[in-house]
Image (cartoon, rainbow, N blue to C red):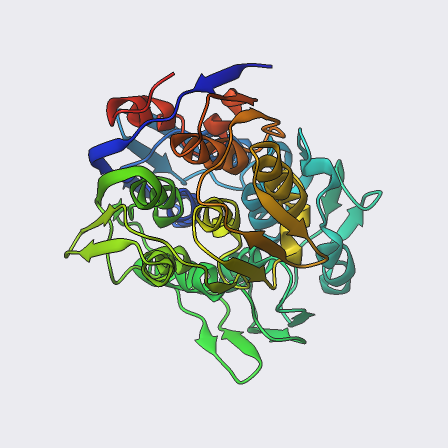
Amino acid sequence: MSTITLSPSQLNGKVAAPPSKSDVHRAIICAALSGGVCRVAPVSLSNDIKATISCIRALGAEVSVSGDTVTVDGTNLFNSKTAVLDCSESGSTLRFFIPIAAAGGADATFIGSGRLPERPIGIYLDILPQAGVSCKSDKGLPLEISGQLRSGTFSLPGDISSQFITGLLLALPLLDGDSEIVLTTPLSSVGYIDMTLDCMRRFGVVAVRTAKGWFIKGNQRYVSTDYRTDGDWSQAAFFMAAGAVSGDVTVEGLRLNSTQGDKEVAEILRRFGADIELSENSVRVRRSKLTATEINAGDIPDLVPILAVVASFAEGKTRIYNAERLRIKESDRLRTTADMLNALGGKVTEKRDELIIEGTGKLRGGEVDGANDHRIVMSASVAALGCESKVTITDRESINKSYPDYFEEYFRLGGRG
């Protein structure tokens, strides 16, 4: 278990947003499903992206990496009907590939590490057997599937992880017949579904929105194309928050018209009172007096830890609500976010589906359990900027899951150990 110790400091300057992990997942999968050769760039080889590449290879595609470009050759995808897919700790990889492997008729065994074997997959265990797929699991991993996925109607809640919906959207166009996804509850995390639909469209495949979900025509074909990925708003949020808390940071490479739901971070920081300047492909955030606000986390769950940090430096009481799904992430993020800030002298109350943060203006410092969660570690590093004394954070290496270069950029902008 690695640790990192950080001193109070300011971050100033420009930083390029890393490629969107969510966009890269989808692009690599669509490239493989095209059955041809496609280049996806830029790509950062985080552990989650390595897991998706590993699973694509396990299903028969060839993948090569040169610099920040991933070349995918899907010619032999599904030629091998038996595969072991190691999803590592990536929930996206697991939930995307279960229906994809089933659409290809693969006999597949899914395994994972960290907290992933405990994370829910019950939705698939309920709906896939009704569509011709045998599932063998004790409610988690390992999971064994066999049989050919059949087209039809797939009913599932809209307020669970959007990853289940994305997996079906990616897979169902490959089937012989038409299909429909019917949501039995209102949709959450709309931005992630929009990203999926946008990526599919760029590869020539469409799903039509209906009153209750989507209609997906069968026998569609993904078309080979080279794909340029988006800058990552969810990762940019850490440096934007750093500017709001302590400094003047410009994050470059962000599209203001991106389908990523986490682009809302700019508006939320503005509501906190941060000095925000938007341009065509960058966001500049400067420290200013911060005041509390209310935040609905339903569509932006990944932003909760870092927004809770900002709230700790704001005057007044901030409420972050509609956040119960954070309990089944890499850690129970409602609990670990509250523990992180309270360990540093903050005042955070954890409730069933929300956090109440009483802004203290300045945190004390101390020791933080990173909980093997990349977003907790990076959030704690931003909190350290405004602390009175040093902060020691465990599980530094967990950032490799999503943003391996994070601390390199953090120190380049003026962070101190």
Q: Position of residue 125 (x, y in %)?
A: 77, 55
Q: Quadrant of residue 163?
A: bottom right
| Position of residue 333 measured from the top left corner of the image (x, y, whole percent) | 62, 44
Q: Is residue 293 above or below residue 403?
A: below
Q: How many marks?
A: 0
In the image: residue 257, left or right of residue 137: left
Residue in front for this viewpoint, 163 or 377: 377
Report whether residue 41 is seen: no
User: Residue placed farthest to the left in the image?
Assistant: 280
Residue ID at (27%, 30%): 68
Q: Residue furthest right?
A: 138
Residue 87 in percent (x, y) is at 60, 34
Residue 84 in percent (x, y) is at 65, 31
Residue 148: tell me if it is visible: yes
Q: Residue at x 43, y 52 (%)?
A: 314
Q: Is residue 395 above or below residue 339?
A: above
The answer to which quarter of the image holds residue 182 is: bottom right
Please state which of residues 58 and 326 is positioned toward the viewer in this rendering.
326
For image coordinates 60% across by 56% down, the residue present is 356
Which quadrant: the N terminus?
top right
Instruction: Pick whichever, 231 or 365, lies toward us.
Output: 365
Farthest bottom residue in view: 211
Seen in the image, is 74 located left or right of residue 104? left
* Residue located at (61% from left, 64% from top): 322
